[in-house]
C-alpha cells in the first residue's frame, strides 16, 4: 500500500474549499425544506382538488430527490475531510494506490483510482 503525504500547501486550500462547499449544501438543504409543499401545515386543512394534490406530490418528490443528491454529496465531502485528517487522502479505497492528481483536481472527493473505477462499472 502506497503512503502519500500531500503537502499542506495543497491540503489547506482543499479543506477550505470542501468546508465551504459543505456549508453551501447545508444552506441549500434548508432552502429545500422551506420549498417542500408537504412541510406546509395549511395543506392538511385545505381540501385541494386533485390537480393541487398532484402538484404538491410532484413538488415534494422533486425536493426529496434534490435533498438525496445533497445528502450524497455531503457524505462524500465529510469522508474526504476525514481522509485528509487521517493522512489517507488520495489513496484508492480498493487497491491502495495513489489516485492520479489530475483525477483529484477534477473530483477532489474521488475514492477510487481510474483503473478501479473503470473495473467497478
Image (spheres, rainbow, N blue to C red):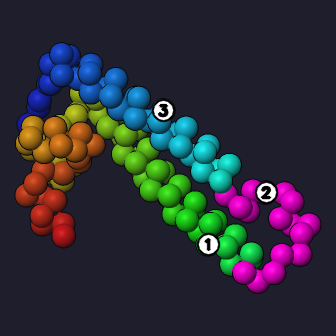
Q: Which of the two discs, 3 and 1, labels the residue nearer the N terminus?
A: 3
| Residue under label 2 | 40
Locate residue 4, reporting x and y percent. 11, 29
Q: Which residues are magenta?
A: 36-51
Residue 69 painted magenta = no
User: Helix, strand or loop at disc 2?
Assistant: loop
Dividing the picture into quadrants, the one containing residue 54 is: bottom right
Instruction: State the separation of the CA atoms marked 2 and 3.
Output: 25 Å
Locate residue 99, reporting x and y percent. 11, 43
Dividing the picture into quadrants, the one containing residue 6 is: top left
| Residue under label 1 | 58
User: Helix, strand or loop at disc 1?
Assistant: helix
Q: Residue at x 55, y 38 (%)?
A: 27
In the image, 96 versus 7, the foreground residue is: 7
Q: Residue at x 47, y 50 (%)?
A: 70
Q: Which of the two discs, 1 and 2, labels the residue nearer the N terminus?
A: 2
Front of the two marks 2 and 3: 2
Quarter of the C terminus within the rendering: bottom left
Q: Is residue 1 visible?
A: no
| Residue under label 3 | 23
Instruction: State if disc 1 and disc 3 touch (CB < 8 Å).
Output: no
Quarter of the N terminus within the rendering: top left
Amino acid at each position: 500500500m502506497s503512503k502519500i503525504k500531500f503537502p499542506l500547501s495543497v491540503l489547506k486550500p482543499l479543506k477550505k474549499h470542501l468546508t465551504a462547499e459543505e456549508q453551501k449544501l447545508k444552506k441549500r438543504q434548508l432552502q429545500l425544506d422551506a420549498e417542500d409543499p408537504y412541510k406546509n401545515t395549511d395543506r392538511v386543512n385545505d381540501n385541494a382538488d386533485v390537480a393541487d394534490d398532484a402538484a404538491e406530490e410532484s413538488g415534494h418528490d422533486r425536493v426529496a430527490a434534490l435533498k438525496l443528491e445533497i445528502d450524497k454529496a455531503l457524505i462524500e465531502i465529510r469522508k474526504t475531510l476525514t481522509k485528509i485528517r487521517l493522512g489517507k487522502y488520495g489513496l484508492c479505497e480498493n487497491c491502495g494506490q495513489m489516485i492520479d492528481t489530475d483525477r483529484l483536481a477534477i473530483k477532489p472527493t474521488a475514492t477510487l483510482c481510474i483503473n478501479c473505477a473503470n473495473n467497478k462499472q
